[in-house]
Amino acid sequence: GDSVTQMEGPVTLSEEAFLTINCTYTATGYPSLFWYVQYPGEGLQLLLKATKADDKGSNKGFEATYRKETTSFHLEKGSVQVSDSAVYFCALSDHLTGANSKLTFGKGITLSVRP
Amino acid sequence: EPEVTQTPSHQVTQMGQEVILRCVPISNHLYFYWYRQILGQKVEFLVSFYNNEISEKSEIFDDQFSVERPDGSNFTLKIRSTKLEDSAMYFCASRPALLASETQYFGPGTRLLVL
């Protein structure tokens, strides 16, 4: 079945540091890939997505490129801010399962950014 | 901006009691979902709902669970006889259209604690 693997956390960085959060996936079809973010006390919000190979999703300075050859969708940001402190979830939605496609999530990783 | 809402934000119940978790999806959305996240674990799919019926359910979604859209706006998850292992954060989500690449919009979650 489909699965998403994220690097182990938590991650603690200083402000303005470079961020990479690794995500790899296994899917039987041609998935769309997503990064969701959960700020403290809030629900899951879409951060960015990519729907086909070599697409790059970007938002709020975050980027991730859909790499079919390595089945990866790593999240990067060049300079993190304290306000980026949150839990980050990688997820996929498999087109083969049709319009009812559920999201399959990774475990999530907590990012803390120090001033 | 329209958003998914969930009530209550927190619920504490005794083992064996029935609970109903409520969600109001975004008004023009067609697909509805429940997910749960046991503390420290992955966000897991429970059930999807379309056109007033369940379209897919996971093996977690056994006979103790049911969903309903009673009035065209609310979307509820009922657990008939709660178990300790049902303690989790429950997220409702909705999606506007057929495409699996479409974003699912999440509510803030209900934290359920079964004692």
Image (cartoon, helix red, strand yellow):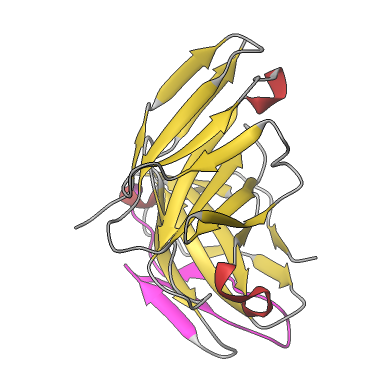
Q: Is B79 or A110 nearer to us in this picture?
A: B79
* The image quarter in which residue A101 lies: bottom right
> In the rendering, at what x and y percent does residue A22 appear?
63, 65
Residue pushed farthest bottom? A54
Name the quadrant of the C terminus of chain A: top left
Q: Is B47 or B106 nearer to us in this picture?
A: B47
- Horizontal relation, residue B80 to residue A18: left or right: right
> In the rendering, at what x and y percent does residue B35 appear?
57, 46
- Horizontal relation, residue A23 to residue B90: left or right: right
Give me the residue at 59% from left, 8% from top.
B14
* The image quarter in which residue A27 lies: bottom right
Residues in magenta, as a range? A56-82
Q: Is residue B98 magenta?
A: no
Q: Is residue A69 magenta?
A: yes
> In the rendering, at what x and y percent does residue B66 appear?
59, 38
Q: Is residue A51 visible to the viewer in this orientation of the structure?
A: yes
> In the rendering, at what x and y percent does residue A4 appear?
70, 62
Give me the residue at 42% from left, 57% from top.
B94
Give me the residue at 65% from left, 49% from top.
A107
Give me the residue at 73% from left, 82% from top.
A70
